[in-house]
Image: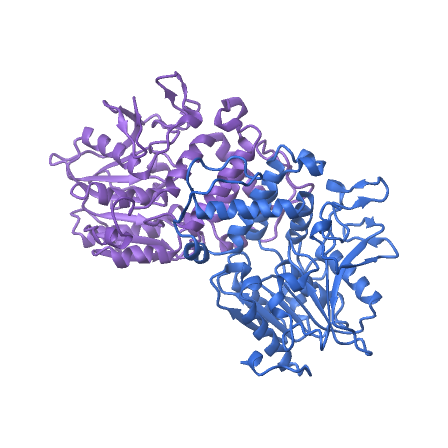
Chain colours: A purple, B blue
Amino acid sequence: MHYQQWISSKTQFYQLPEPLGLESGGSLSNVQVAYRTWGALNSQGDNAILICHALTGSADADRWWQDLFGAGKVFDPDQDFIICSNILGSCYGTTGPTSLNPITNEPYASTFPAITIRDMVRVQAKLLEQLSVQRLKLVIGGSLGGMQVLEWALLYPDWVQAIVPIATSGRHSAWCVALSEAQRQAIYADPQWAAGQYSPERSPNHGLAIARMIAMSTYRSWQSFEQRFGRQIDRAPLPYSAVPKPAEGVSFSIQQYLYRHGQKLVERFDANTYITLTQAMDHHDISQQRGEYIHVLQAIQHPTLVVSIDTDVLYPPAEQQLLAETIPKAQWTSITSMHGHDGFLIDTQVLNDRVVAFGHSLGWGNALTASSLE
Amino acid sequence: MHYQQWISSKTQFYQLPEPLGLESGGSLSNVQVAYRTWGALNSQGDNAILICHALTGSADADRWWQDLFGAGKVFDPDQDFIICSNILGSCYGTTGPTSLNPITNEPYASTFPAITIRDMVRVQAKLLEQLSVQRLKLVIGGSLGGMQVLEWALLYPDWVQAIVPIATSGRHSAWCVALSEAQRQAIYADPQWAAGQYSPERSPNHGLAIARMIAMSTYRSWQSFEQRFGRQIDRAPLPYSAVPKPAEGVSFSIQQYLYRHGQKLVERFDANTYITLTQAMDHHDISQQRGEYIHVLQAIQHPTLVVSIDTDVLYPPAEQQLLAETIPKAQWTSITSMHGHDGFLIDTQVLNDRVVAFGHSLGWGNALTASSLE
């Protein structure tokens, strides 16, 4: 409950009535799901849209995808019933490593079981059942969110009507696994890691901050850092407690930027959670137990908009092009951005317009404004 | 002397007769330079070629650039006098953090002063004076080596006749600074870091291994890791002592690859040295105290071959294109490689051919074989 302060007061909670069977073979009791909704479900229960969030995201999609909300936009509460739930294994209200293990009455910490993207999606499905959702007009998400989108199409094909996977892949690349592993190792190297059995007062903050520093570099791009920071110097003192040994004297602004982002993450996120979720991403592979990768993609029958960011170095456009070329009813769109992978959270107006146009092509009967279609 | 085992028995040593003044304002006494030579200097002293090595390289260029050595190749000991010296601040025989401070008789460790690329080049210049080199036919190097190449052209324009900077930039980008800082922070986070005053028996091995894991990911490319490892599993036990907390159970081969490279680096390199040299790279900026960046590049009057690797994410081709477009007598060549930044150490036959052709265009009177010109 250490992360309670980051959970919006509008969050609702649903407790799964039965233990959740996991892909890894074990099960979790008393699973709680934190979620937000916007708008209302219609009488047919078929105007629902599911938003899937990324690694350190939360159910508060109206904060981190604000530009996609509003009249005539992708998420229009006057038209649709929009749902976003905190994913299994996270620390914003859904059961994860910071939750109490009902058997020991202690936080799971590093004893939290290995989970998969499919486990996350099955928890979301139980929530949607509870909410009486009959049809999902759309399942949409970027990065780890996009992995969930693809699993939705494969696990619940009849429930889903259209999907928008963004800046993601059908199976995690070796490059992504490499960069994730370096991040986890930075946490393991922190003396406060204590094999994952740290207390909230003595968390591996330095290690988690470094993981974020690596991640932030790969979420952005060479161009973005060059244009924004270049070789600019920052003479401000360093108030970031999570970064106890900065370079002596003067720092480049880019260094301060990374310290600040490292510091911000340790204030709002948990190291065991970071490890649990990045491992789930590394094991993401839609072909697992389903056959040939290409055949699995070919089996997705939904109208699909695959979105790339042209400067994404983590999930390069070639990965999404393969998705779009293989999923039969897919179209591909690439967003021109200098922001790299994070473009899906930054260039949100362009993203909104592309998804609105996709919805229009599906004949969504909504009150689209002319401007959103331009 | 801990790193003695990595220094070839053919290495020669030169002790600077006077203290070395540093850019940072201080000075270093008793500076020793470790170097290798191949071939012989002619009577005019004008057949010399200087090789500048990269971050964790050594004077043993015939090991790490083997394919460029031989009759009719870039480095032809029958024609030319080829020199490569271990750079200032390194741990392979030239004075650096692992050397004894003559005042305290203890290793410098973290008290080694901040050094710059210009300091490295000035030490090389003193060695070349001692060797009676009158003219440098060519100064060549990649990455940190390429930074030295550019500084050579600017510090000693009359000495140098042609330059080949490879996979490098005229000033370190914010993106490179970011990734370097994350690597240094991983060392700082290691409990054995001890503010740089560690003993050889208790070195920050885990931190240095993580730094290498991050670095290796950025030295290669998405394509290279995908083609070589993909989602291949490796069930071998993990014998890498520098990586004490690997992921439980089964690992991906890419993880094992990174552990192995981390382990290899801690066996052959020193953490304070890594920090000293990466900080020197971060402060690399040929315009420092010389005026506008573009004007400084325009002042380089040497025939120049600027080499890019098309998949280099650390020093993207746009950086070298800018060099080539601005240096008046420069030409640009891009090597098609899936290996990323490390392409200059891997795709060495193509590299050799491009540089040989460049030498030919300069009228080098050497016994080039027909095949090398194809």
- In this view, the residue farthest toward the left is A44
Residue at horizontal 59%, vertical 39%? B207
* Frontmost residue, A247 versus B42: B42
Where is residue A79? Give x, y as percent: 19, 40
**Residue A3 is at least partly visible in this image:** no
Residue A176 in percent (x, y) is at 43, 48
In the image, residue B308 sits, relative to residue A97, either above or below, namely: below
- x and y, in percent, of residue A304 in the image: 24, 52
At a point 35% along the width and 26% down the height, the residue shown is A93
Picture residue at 28% right of the left edge, 47% below the top: A287
Can residue A34 be seen by looking at this rendering?
Answer: yes
**Compared to A335, does A216 lie above or below?**
above
The quadrant in which residue B297 appears is bottom right
Q: Is residue B88 left or right of residue A177?
A: right
| Residue closest to the far right | B17
In this rendered view, identify the residue nearer to me: B131 or B20.
Answer: B131
